[in-house]
Image (cartoon, coloured by chain):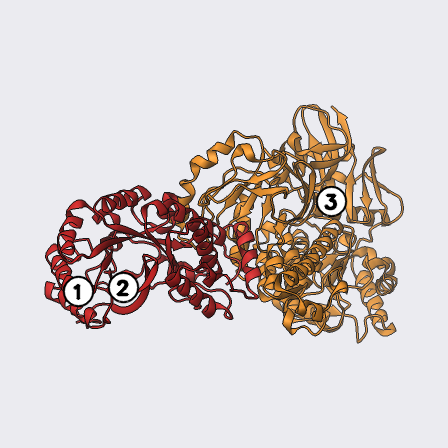
Chain colours: A red, B orange
Amino acid sequence: MKKKRYSPGMPVAVWTGRDPQEGTAVDSLTVIFRTIGCYWSRKSGCTMCGYFNDAADEPPSEDDLLSQLDRALEKMGTGTSLLKIFTSGSFLDEREVSKEVRNAMMERIGKIGSIKKIMAETRPEFVNEKILGSILDILEKYDIKFEVAIGLETSSDTIRKDCINKGFTFNDFTRASEIASKMGVSTKAYLLLKPPFLSEKTAIEDALASISDAAPYATTISLNLTNIQKGTLVEELYDRRDYRPPWLWSAVFVLRTAKEKFPGLTLVSDPVAAGTKRGPHNCRECDRDVAQALRDFSITQDIEALSWLDCECYSLWEKVVELEDYAFGSFLVK
Amino acid sequence: MTKYFEVTRRDAAARLGKLLLDDHYPTPLILHPEKDSPIVFAGSLWARNILSPEEVDPGKLVILPGKPMPLHARPEMVKEIYDSAKQERQQWEKRDVATGQLVHPAYPDIPHADMYVIGAARQMENNPRMLLDTVIHIKNNTPPDTALYAPALATPENLCLLLYLGIDVVDDIIPTIKAYDGIYMMPDGGYRLSDLPVLPCSCSVCTNTSVEDLQEMNPQERGKLVAGHNVNRLVEEKQIAVQRIRGGNLREYVEGKCRSSPWLTALLRFMDQEHVYLEQHTPTYRSVTMYANTSESLNRVEVKRFAGRVRSQYQAPAANILLLLPCSARKPYSISNSHQLFNRATGRNRRALNEVIITSPLGIVPRELELVYPAAHYDIPVTGHWDLEEQSWVTGCLVDYLKNNKYSHIIAHVDGAYRDICQSAAETLGLDITYTAQGSVTSARSLGALRSTVSGIVRDGEYILRKTTEMAKNMLRGIADYQFGRGAGWLLVPDGASIKAPFPKYQVYDDKKQLASLNPRTGTLIPTLEGAMRLLELGTYQIQIDDFVPSGNLLAPGVVDADVNIRPSDQVIVVSERVLGVGRALMGGSEMVRSTRGIAVDLRKVMEI
């Protein structure tokens, strides 16, 4: 018999951090629940997403899920006002977290007292009046705001289809955002910097265009820098030297340019696995500093955090951006 | 139909040509990708902004918009994504501009274009098998008068091999990128700039700067300068290759250049293994020296082809005695000191002999073919040492010859490795060979033994001593069979023919009409119109043309059909209902049928029937 690689009453991960909220930085708690995982990953799956690796082998019981929440809340510091909820899928998909469990969770969170806002990640097809209504019915009692976080990845339907295989359209996203907005629920959009097949320049241009397109529908945009996750198509490409994660300089450029254009928009980026071969990287020399600058900017929203950076490899990156389109499918520098 | 590219010169798969755009751009072309390059990319269909057909300057070649996929993407994905861009591509079809098509190795069909772009070519560095297969796949499925572009692949180190492979367009992307990555490129590979104590180059950039200067610069300035040097080196390599293609000796340069890297050496070896790809473009005749300096020389088309034709087309004149001789450094062998001594030793009895010369890398050369390219044109490093591969190749050639030609006596006037080869051939076939040399083949003792052995055999038997003119006819028949196929000898040099002019500028006459003359520089028989008429019944080396009277050059569009065995430099016969012509082919038979541009035949004489 296969030995369980996890305990069903424990969340996949919990951590504390700081996040920008309405002009200031606040303490946050992030939890990833272990549910049966994303239905789309079982049906088809996205090229870069390896979160199915964190799904439960068997559906966790209601008690398991509530226990996961309790374990997470134990890690929470006093004064934490933001709770961010992920499931490696969609928190609002009732096949992952039933309505009953979800409502029980909302009650428990509400009773803590310090939480002012809950953010939960979901695909847009689960954002509807009924589900949001049932959540808001509880949260309004505790004066907690709710935010849906949607992995839009790009505003280009062609790229989302060809390169990501996300299975929804930009329209699906805007519809979800508008429903949420009508009910007083804010939207956070996740964008993917450098889906597979794109040159560095096309990736940068896509991220900038996507920020412009998504800005009217999102209060916060988070730029996810593609990294190599286990068992994904992107990993298959990476293993055959068909793919290179984005340069950190590209993220710096995108955030700087976008922040100048949309000063009021909250722009964040947590460069997962930065500085490793399987993560976004520049040369070895500057990776740590540039990644830290991206994190600092994400908290402070101060463009100065990104302005002082420089490295020998910056002009190499500029050339890559200029010339990689002409490699017609290959990347130019590891 | 291609009206934007023309091939003007060929050396095996390598070629010189020109892109006919707002200006004529000679190929090989090193593209510097920017807005006003002669070749522009309309853009990735994943990008937000791409060029529309209306925006493209009609004087440029435009690479159609596409979705460039990495090399190893799953084939079904490559196909699906390619097909999803069909509509965008169709917009361009109505427009009369020169177009380039992106071809991913995994995509089975190749749509029409004037230039083909090898998708993700960069990833084929270090993968010679895939690069070769991809190039052959594209070449086999596209018209010969279209250009081939390998993007982001060329370096000063590999450029001549890429051109040898048949690529027409490259770019300066890798030399540029490497410069900004601190790599200083030389013809033998890349060096880390930080490891160089001095700059090992005297190009325009390097004479005006130093390692110290470069170190003090900011990365941008430094990158720009080093890129200047790297690109200078790339351009220099191109110029050498162009010169070599003109001279018909790119192969020798490539054999040397490939040594700097295993993947390039492997690429050359794979190309030789493919044989057909190179063979169909390799000229049959050249007048320049063929250097056989490497082990790969043994596998080059010229060597395999010569041996093949000696085996299957050449027919030895009737004789019962065979004399095997070693090769000489001086060519043709007859004019060398050693062969003059051999001739003097055999004297008039020589007319009873067949003479066959043993040599590396050609194997064996019948005396009758000693003028034929490359028998009179090759040169090798002579050390006295033969490696095993060389020995077994030459032995095999000799064994084949001895199987096809029976003699009552075989004499070998050879020593050293030549003798080993004769012995092993004799052993294989159970033949007896008389060895006449003891020690040096040119010693008085050896020559005396040769003289007495030959005269002894001739004296004791009923052997015909051919007349001198008969020997000349034998030589010309041998050359004709080698050149046009078995049987050509008797058609072009019939029994009653007479031979004029001294060796080797022979002319063949019959009924007071000249049939052919021998070009001693290449060892080619040049048929006259009368000679061509005699050859017609053989059916080889003929080109059918449309109903018109060509003059000067025959262009490819006029060719209706052509013998697929025609190679550049071959003497050919041009025929139609109205005309008969003779000339020299400038492209292969299948290329002239499939091309819409370029000179197919340099015509010498045409007559209306």
Q: Contact (CB < 8 A) between labels 2 and 1?
A: no
Image quarter hosting the C terminus of chain B: top right
Residue located 50% across and 46% down the image: B103
Q: Residues within 10 Å of mark 1 (few under 14, many from 20)?
A: some
Image quarter hosting the N terminus of chain B: top right
**Kind of residue sitting beneath label 2:** Asn
Q: In which image quadrant can residue B298 be found?
A: bottom right
- Residue B593 to residue B192: above or below: above
Is residue B547 something one can see in this rendering?
Answer: yes
Q: Position of residue B443 (x, y in %)?
A: 85, 73
- For the residue pair A93 and B508, the one nearer the viewer reads as A93
- For the residue pair B588 and B415, the one nearer the viewer reads as B588
**Kind of residue sitting beneath label 3:** Ala
Q: Nearer the viewer, mark 3 or mark 2?
A: 2
- For the residue pair B311 and A197, the one nearer the viewer reads as A197
Q: Are marks 3 and 2 on the same chain?
A: no
From the viewer's perspective, tell me whether residue B558 is left or right of residue B125.
Answer: right
Q: Which mark is residue B480?
A: 3
Q: Which residue corresponds to mark 1? A: A113
Q: Which residue corresponds to mark 2? A: A53
- Residue A154 to residue A66: above or below: above
Q: Position of residue B159 (x, y in %)?
A: 64, 56
**Kind of residue sitting beneath label 1:** Gly
- Residue B362 to residue B418: above or below: above
Q: Nearer the viewer, mark 3 or mark 1?
A: 1
CA distance for labels 3 and 2? 74 Å
| Label 3: chain letter | B
CA distance for labels 3 and 1? 104 Å
| Label 2: chain letter | A
